Amino acid sequence: SFALENEHDQAMAAYFKAYQLMKGCHLPLLYIGVEYGLTNNHKLAEQFFNQALGIAAKDPFVLHELGVTCFQNQDYIGAERYFKSALQEVRKVHGSVLSSKWESLLNNLGHTARKLEKYNDSLFYHQQALVLIPMSASTYSAIGYVQSLQGDLVEAVEAFHKALSLRRDDTFSTTMLNFVIEQLMVESPPF
């Protein structure tokens, strides 16, 4: 409840107490790391995630959070490695049908692939995320962005329109839509 109220210090104190009471359990360490990440202390977050990983080496939540930390540190190769490991562990448990709670993992894989200029992989992961949560404005926006980077401007316009139909006040989609339409006007000759 402290974490939901953004009371990070109190949440960490509760998680530290939980760790003392539940020796050998990795979850308090994971959540301490999450709280440090939310307060932009990525080095401490990474230390706690690594401690949690030492206890539960195949926990997809820990792997996912380590991937987020790598991404924030601009270590995109490390992020991709952790995200793919997390996805592999999730698929071992759930098979090919994933729960909607893993949408963020797929989108994070898509963002990481985009940063590594693996645009087809990026689109693939974002489209998988869209299967899990079909009405996600941010996923449509991410798809439009990747399509614009690939030069698929008409498809990008459509994706940004879908994002804006779901969230009208999305400034990124609005800005990108205007940019892509300007690019289309430059490339397309007038009638």
Image (tube, rainbow, N blue to C red):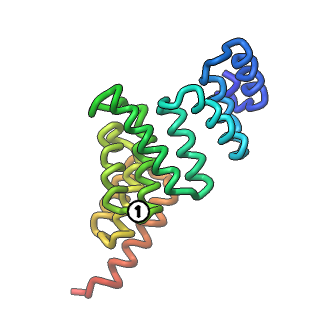
SS of the residue at dot 1?
A: helix
Q: Quadrant of the N terminus?
A: top right
Q: Residue at x 45, y 59 (%)?
A: 173
Question: Label 1 sits on what residue type?
Answer: Tyr
Q: Is residue 161 visible?
A: no
In the picture, measured across the screen, residue 8 lies left or right of residue 142, that is right
Q: Residues within 10 Å of mark 1 (few under 14, many from 20)?
A: many
Q: Is residue 142 visible?
A: yes
Quadrant position of residue 188 = bottom left
Residue 131 drawn above or below residue 2: below
Task: Give coordinates of residue 131: x percent, y percent.
Answer: 29, 40
Residue 160 drawn above or below residue 58: below
Q: Residue at x 41, y 55 (%)?
A: 141
Location of mark 1 (residue): 145
Task: Give coordinates of residue 85: x percent, y percent.
Answer: 43, 40
Q: Quadrant of the C terminus?
A: bottom left
Task: Give coordinates of residue 25: x percent, y percent.
Answer: 61, 19
In the picture, measured across the screen, residue 135 lies left or right of residue 61, that is left
